Image (spheres, rainbow, N blue to C red):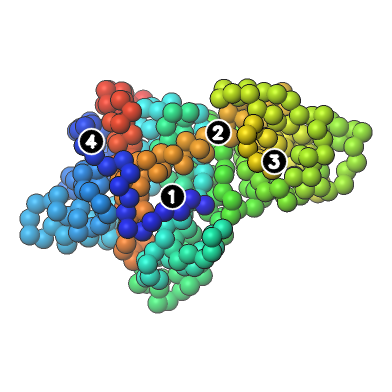
Amino acid sequence: MRDGLDDGAAAGEGPIPDVLDAELCRRLFGSLHRSGQRVKAEQYVRGLLSVRGRKTLRSIAAQFDGASAQQNVHHFIASSPWEWVPVRHALARQAQRALAPQAWVIDSLLIPKAGPHSVGADPQPTPLGTVNGQQAVGTWLTSERAAVPVDWQLRLSARWTVEPLRHRASVPPDAVPGTVEECVRQAVVGLMGVGEMPRLPVVVDVAEADGISIARFLASTGLPFAVRVDAAAPVRIDRSLLPKYGDLLHTAGELSESLPHLRQQVNPGDGRTTAAAIPVSASPSGREAMTLLGECPPGRPAEPRLWLTNFTADRLAPALRLTRLPGVVERDCAEISDGVGLRDFAGRSFPGWHRHITLACVAHLVSAAARRGDVTHINRTTVR
């Protein structure tokens, strides 16, 4: 889980070229039925791009005209009846055209909070101890050069789905308490529902999730995938491909260490590395054939990085290329997303959180295009 400070981040702030033109706004906000909503969406994104420091509703309202600007911004985000999913779908299609992504990357994000009142805030375990905050699962369209967030799931504990918190936070009736694995499954279902998109691999790097469970779910979808798994994840050797080995249950870490003759030198595009591709089954029935990737990069700790994938052993290099993409997400989240207020929403409203983070994703796309010199490309891309 990637974490961050609740007081905002200065990373990525600075003058942003004006690439949020009328045509781009039409593509992104065309699902908003009222012209006033479309204007407010554009103004809100401009506020996220221009306000320095923490992006609060008050600081963003300073970009609006009129004495009731703060009230209008609060209403637009917290209670105005516009749906965020169509905006996210439009954003995904625009990011696909501008970015030519190689995969969807799903990862988790910790958003620390000072108190218990922000929607979804609960004690969250981290390697450094328990932190109060929100846990979200993000879906990013990612290439080797850039990543753009296009969808988010906010994990809710049981206390947020019963009264009085459900009513206070405007949590909808169909929102139920769930695990991180369930959030990841929702994210996969969500990306499969975006129209006019190419069939892309799915990369899941969520330490808090059961990687075996997620890999089985992805296998059922037929999508190409790579899922980061813990060394303790239980797997069996696929004896149809390695008949000389027993069918005892092993941990992924044990298999990676015990079959050194399967290791090979491979260059996935960023230099030579040592990796093994082991055919395994991730279910007791043996019906879910997958490949366990165990990589020991040069100069890294001895413990290998482990992934389950439906790429076969003869496609080791392209599979390893996919495992590099979460690093692009981590970099762009720190350099761009934090600077446009992705973690900054402090309200108690569930719809407000989703609307704010949706517009922060739009701001991320605009900022990424401007900073990486894609201004002309993002504005002249034709709608398919």
Mark 4: which amino acid? Answer: Ile
Label 1 vs 3, first from the N-terminus: 1
Mark 2: which amino acid? Answer: Arg
Residue 341 lies left or right of residue 17; in this view the side is right
Against 355, is 24 above or below?
A: above
Q: Quadrant of residue 380?
A: top left
- Of marks 1 and 2, the one in the foreground: 2
- Dot 1 and dot 3 residues touching (CB under 8 Å): no
CA gap between label 4 and label 2 equals: 28 Å
Residue 175 locus on image (x, y percent): 46, 62
Q: Is residue 63 visible?
A: yes
Residue density around tag 3, few if under 14, some if 14–19, many if 20 or more, within 10 Å: few
Label 1 vs 2, first from the N-terminus: 1
- Dot 2 and dot 3 residues touching (CB under 8 Å): no
Disc 3: which residue: 302
Residue 252 lies left or right of residue 354; in this view the side is right
Disc 1: which residue: 152
- Dot 1 and dot 2 residues touching (CB under 8 Å): no
Q: Is residue 175 visible?
A: no
Mark 1: which amino acid? Answer: Trp
Label 3 vs 4, first from the N-terminus: 4
CA gap between label 3 and label 4 equals: 43 Å
Query: Which residue lies at the image location 56% right of the left edge and 38% below the top edge?
Result: 203
Residue density around tag 4, few if under 14, some if 14–19, many if 20 or more, within 10 Å: some
Residue 16 numbered tag = 4
Q: Nearer the viewer, residue 177 or 373?
A: 373
- Dot 4 and dot 2 residues touching (CB under 8 Å): no
